[in-house]
Amino acid sequence: MDRETRSDVPLGRRMPQASTRIVIADRNVITRVGLRSILERNTGFAVIAEATSYDAVIDAVDEHGPDVLIIDLDLGDDTTRGLKVVEEVTERYPTTKVLVLANTLSEMIVVEALRRGATGYLCKDDVKADELGKGIKAIQDGETVLGKGVGNLVAHSLGSTRQTEHLTDREIDVIKHVAKGLSTKQIAVAMFISDSTVKFHLQNASRKLGAHRRAEIVHRAVAAGLL
Amino acid sequence: MDRETRSDVPLGRRMPQASTRIVIADRNVITRVGLRSILERNTGFAVIAEATSYDAVIDAVDEHGPDVLIIDLDLGDDTTRGLKVVEEVTERYPTTKVLVLANTLSEMIVVEALRRGATGYLCKDDVKADELGKGIKAIQDGETVLGKGVGNLVAHSLGSTRQTEHLTDREIDVIKHVAKGLSTKQIAVAMFISDSTVKFHLQNASRKLGAHRRAEIVHRAVAAGLL
DNA sequence: TAACGACCTAGCCAAATGGCTAGGTGATGG
DNA sequence: CCATCACCTAGCCATTTGGCTAGGTCGTTA
């Protein structure tokens, strides 16, 4: 599926041998084309493959062994899988740097991504055109690149002793129902479990997300791309 | 693949008469570059200006009088202003077609945008590369272009008699506090108003958004890009 | 085997919320 | 001048919620 996009790449022309080989993972065509266009303005960058699903990312990295993987963690309906991909890539290919390119800023996601080996985290809306190239160069020099506002989040999370825990499937299910405006009882009926269990899952989710009210749970879950 | 032939910003006056003159409004560089790149692959499209703020959109339309305005309603922190821009453009320049390019799908926003004269509504994540060109051509032919899932929303809203009302500034303020997990009392203190007023605003917001619980209010407000 | 995590259930009580009626002000514009 | 709208306040009451303790099963993994 990514094979034909690879043939699109103009490798021949005046590309120096020292060019950085990049794989882009994003479900959004416009973003993929934009990234490719911005990167290939600068010499020294070559986008060698694009991926639009979690499996395709792994395949592309396996096949091309790129220098840099630029990835939007939200490739489907579950950002958590994006985190797993980051972990797998950095573990199996230590020389491949991972730069996360996110739509939104969530402390949980940022921290988790960095913990799993990402060497950069930028926010799409905040990034300037020239920052991309600079960021990638910096990453290749061994630096960690954090976009506007990301640094603060990281600092904040370092201060707290709270370990970031990830939500279970069931917890996310319950939160989805909460977001639809259902009451505890209605959720219990919809999920074939007891009221107590619904409250149990929400209590745990509250703790993990650092929230104290259902509205905040939903807000944070949305920000984290969990819904 | 004449990707590289587009060197610098091609101004309208240099383009052939038959080409569609387009203005892009989006705060995201990557998206702007991507759009430009995709559109200029096809002959017949010329991106003559880009804008990243509400004021800049109006200025650009005033100056260039484009055939099509492609706009992401969320250019700042208030999607409502994006709606106003759509209204102003379609009112003052009936020949300029407006195509909304959104990140998320919200019934309220879709309906409001169409009511104010938008002739198309696409969702960034769902749109395919070739759909963009086709969509713009269709729009120029007088059609209304609705992306995947958008049609259903519109149909659904036609069924309901409920008139879409927009939230007031105060209501949005309160919702923002709710999203942060504050209680009624805490919000009252933070906003220097009484508990009753907080509940009053939330009741009104509930009605307007069709929600019955704070969590759902937050969810819908986020989806509508109001936060 | 034991430990662990995800999952499930019960009950308690104070606090918060949802939904309602019934008022008030000030600014704006037909 | 009157209507409209955004904004503000009060009180009532049933329901929901947050926060807690205290159990249980099942499957996986050390």
Image: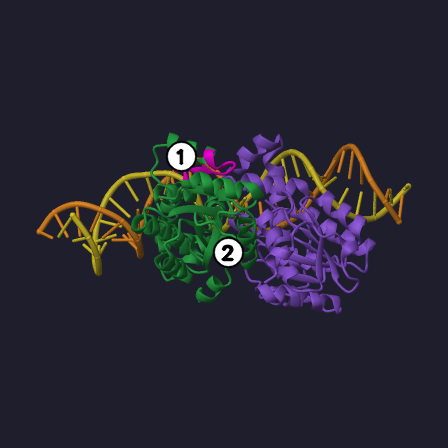
Chain colours: A green, B purple, C orange, D yellow
Q: Which residues are magenta?
A: A141-151
Disc 1 sits on a residue from what chain? A
Q: Is residue B173 visible?
A: yes
The answer to which quarter of the image holds residue B100 is bottom right
**Depth check, front residue: A211 or C21:** A211
Q: Looking at the picture, which amino acid does disc 2 mark?
A: Lys
Q: Which residue is mark 1?
A: A157
| Secondary structure beneath label 1 | helix
Q: Looking at the picture, which amino acid does disc 1 mark?
A: Ser
**Depth check, front residue: B149 or B100:** B100
Assign the N terminus of chain B to one quadrant of the image: bottom right
Magenta-span inclusion, residue A145 = yes
Q: Which residue is mark 2?
A: A180
The answer to which quarter of the image holds residue C3 is top left
Q: Are marks 2 and 1 on the same chain?
A: yes
Give the number of marks: 2
Mark 2 or mark 1: name the one nearer the start of the chain. Answer: 1
Number of residues whose C-alpha sits closer than 10 Å to that of mark 2, classed few (under 14), some (14–19) or many (20 or more): some
Left or right, A62 with respect to A36, comes to left
Query: Which residue sits at x=63%, y=46%?
Result: B27
Assign the C terminus of chain B to one quadrant of the image: top right
| Secondary structure beneath label 2 | loop
Q: Is residue A105 visible?
A: no
Query: Which residue sits at x=32%, y=52%?
Result: A88
**Depth check, front residue: A28 or C19:** A28
Return the x and y of residue B73 as percentages of the image width and height: 66, 51
Left or right, B136 with respect to A55, comes to right
Return the x and y of residue A64 as percentages of the image width and height: 38, 57
